[in-house]
Amino acid sequence: MLNFFTNYTTRKLIKLNMMSKKFIAPIIIFTLLLLSLLLIFLPSISAEKNGRITINRAINLPLLKQHEKETLLVFFGYSGCVDICTPRLMQIASWYDKLNVSIKKRTTLLFFDLSSPEDKNTPDRFAKTFHNDFHGIYLNRQNINNYVSAFDVYYAQSLFKANEIDHTSHLYLLKKGEKGHDLRTIYSAYPYDLLQVKTDMEGLLNE
């Protein structure tokens, strides 16, 4: 009887060992494939401790082409957003107001509204409450996904307040290219390091 249980246990252990070996190879292959994809698709992205992410991604979207400035700052939010958009846009506006005239002539801020309000002029009115040089951009339900996908923006209806939207609050810096715009830097940490933004912007303008 003891021999029976010993042999039975041994056979089970051998079977489990064979099954483990069977799954190890696919796991190793999947891991190597994932690492290869990361090395292929993420070579131009580097993140720093202060939330500054350098990147070089071509973005060819029609609403960007309407603005001829050499550099663009882009922010996604929604009109009437108090907790997230208002303090960030106030900080940017205060900083923007202190820029020298030569830089202001070559850059602007675009505020993309994620709420698709009934009045298409609402986003621009909201943006201009912070600074007259800012532009509010209306996104309809058909093209909104193109823009949030291009910038990797997260947004969703708030689970706690029906009239609010949870969304990414990054600041994006773009440079105008021959065929469109290139996303060059993302600032994810708030308060934004606007001295760094100015340095990066001047670097792009002098390229």
Image (cartoon, rainbow, N blue to C red):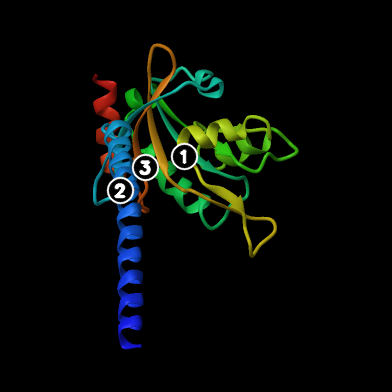
Q: Mark 2 points at which residue?
A: 25
What residue is at 31 percent from the left and 76 percent from the top? 7
Labels 2 and 1: the sequence-earlier one: 2
What residue did someone put label 3 on?
Answer: 95
Residue beneath disc 1: 152
Label located before the other in sequence (3 or 1): 3
Q: Is residue 110 visible?
A: no
How far is mark 3 from mark 1, CA to CA?
Answer: 25 Å
**Cβ atoms at labels 3 and 1 below 8 Å apart:** no
Q: Nearer the viewer, mark 2 or mark 3?
A: 2
Q: Residue 180, can we see it? A: yes
Residue type of the residue flagged with mark 2: Ala
> Label 2 vs label 3: CA separation?
55 Å
Up the image or down, 8 lies above or below 54; here it is: below
Q: How crowded is mark 3: few (under 14 residues within 10 Å), some or many (20 or more)?
A: few
Q: Are dots 2 and 3 in contact, CB under 8 Å? A: no
